[in-house]
Image: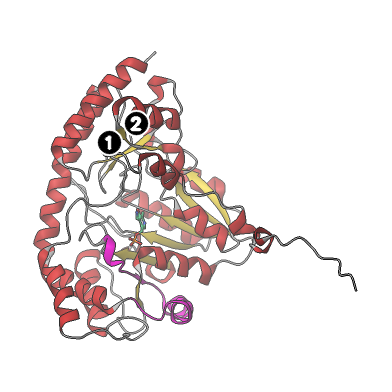
Amino acid sequence: MSMNKQEFSAESFIVAPVRDLPKSGIREFFDLVAGRTDVISLGVGEPDFTTPWNIRESAIYSLEAGHTSYTSNAGLPSLRNGICDYLGKYYNVEYSPQSECLVTIGVSEALDLAMRALINPGDEVIYTTPCFVSYPAEVLMARGVPVPLVTKDCDNFSVDPAELRKLITPKSKVLLLNFPCNPTGAVASEATLQEIAQIAIEHNLIVITDEIYSELVYDDCKHVSIASLPGMKERTIFLHGFSKAFAMTGFRIGYVCGPKAIMDAMYKIHQYSIMCAPITAQEAALEALKSARKDMLMMRDSYWERRNIIVRGLRSAGLDCVMPQGAFYSFPSIKCTNMTSREFAEGLLKEESVAVVPGSAFGPGGEGYVRACYATAEEQIIIALDHIKRFVERHSK
Ligand code: PMP
């Protein structure tokens, strides 16, 4: 008997939103850098500090003491208590450790949980951009519709509330914010956040706020969480973690706090798909909250110094650059070269062995800029700036 055999195609089994998802522009660019030892990298978005010793020691101790089991799904009660105390003290927002706090595998998992818990197919998620590469991808994987709200250098890459209003439709459900911002370093002022909060309340939006860089703010800038504003806690999902401020990217540990009903939904997804964050990382995170504030402030001061050096250097190289108020990224305009951001980044790598990330990798609004991370040794930054200056001089029209 002859069967009408179809040619097997593994690709045909893949769901459309994943099949159609482009690969991260950052990763693609770093494939070009991989294997080259002569490159000064202002590319990667992570601290150049090793995790402070107290934190590493507590992880070592945790293993030595044989703490190798699962924890409760929501995370160690002691860690959840520590997180909620920390948020009460520094963010002016009170959460219940029992019902409003979940420990996750970094902000990455928390973001994924939030999208999966909230998005029905076709729901619109307004997100500020240029942004962290995962935002639109996460919305698409949840079958939502990402709606970019482009922030501009003339507004210091903060949100223009009038632009936000224009994007709202009956399908708008979520507003996703990230201040301080990757890749622009922008911080939103309290007045701007108040206007955004007003719009969210008026239009019944849920706000997801990714505050992963919130300890890293500079000068007289004060970080304000939108969750702390009147009427907002009940409609805000607060994401934070230990990766950036405590230099713990490899521990993969973060958390999410929010209204109980939504936390219950996120908890279910977390319970079935993750179970719990690793106990070693959880115990290390608790130690970070207990004893690493001084280390964190020292790292912040060091980023501040390097921010001043890089921005001064970029400007003297002829590039316009908004002064970043937070995180550890500068986002200079490269428009004076008449190159695309990709041409600029590839040219700089090829001709001057300096790696930066093309702004186009960060979505709409990113073209015309590059991201230069200053969480790199000061001497390296100084050499890189020299090379950038040479490159810009050669290519400015
Ligand atoms: N949010 C932003 C804005 C980020 O820049 C990053 C990491 N680059 C993350 C979330 C992911 O952080 P985590 O290590 O906590 O998963």
How far across and down, in percent of the image, does residue 40 sit? 25, 36
Question: Could you give the CA–CA distance between mark 2 and mark 1, rounded to whole angstroms?
Answer: 8 Å
- In the image, is 218 to the left or to the right of 167? left
Q: Residue 349 carries which label?
A: 2
Q: In this figure, what is the number of numbered marks?
A: 2
The magenta region covers 249-277
Q: Which mark is residue 39?
A: 1
Q: Is mark 2 on a helix, strand or loop?
A: helix
Circle nearer the N terminus (2, 1): 1
Q: What residue is shown at x 47% (from left), y 62% (from top)?
A: 201
Q: What residue is shown at x 79% (from left), y 63% (from top)?
A: 6
Q: What residue is shown at x 45% (from left), y 55% (from top)?
A: 134
Please tell me whether residue 357 belongs to the stretch shown in magenta: no
How far across and down, in percent of the image, does residue 137 sit? 51, 55
How far across and down, in percent of the image, does residue 126 sit? 51, 53
Residue farthest to the right, as pictured: 1
Instruction: Decide if residue 90 is in sight here.
Output: yes
Q: Front-most of 35 and 317?
A: 35
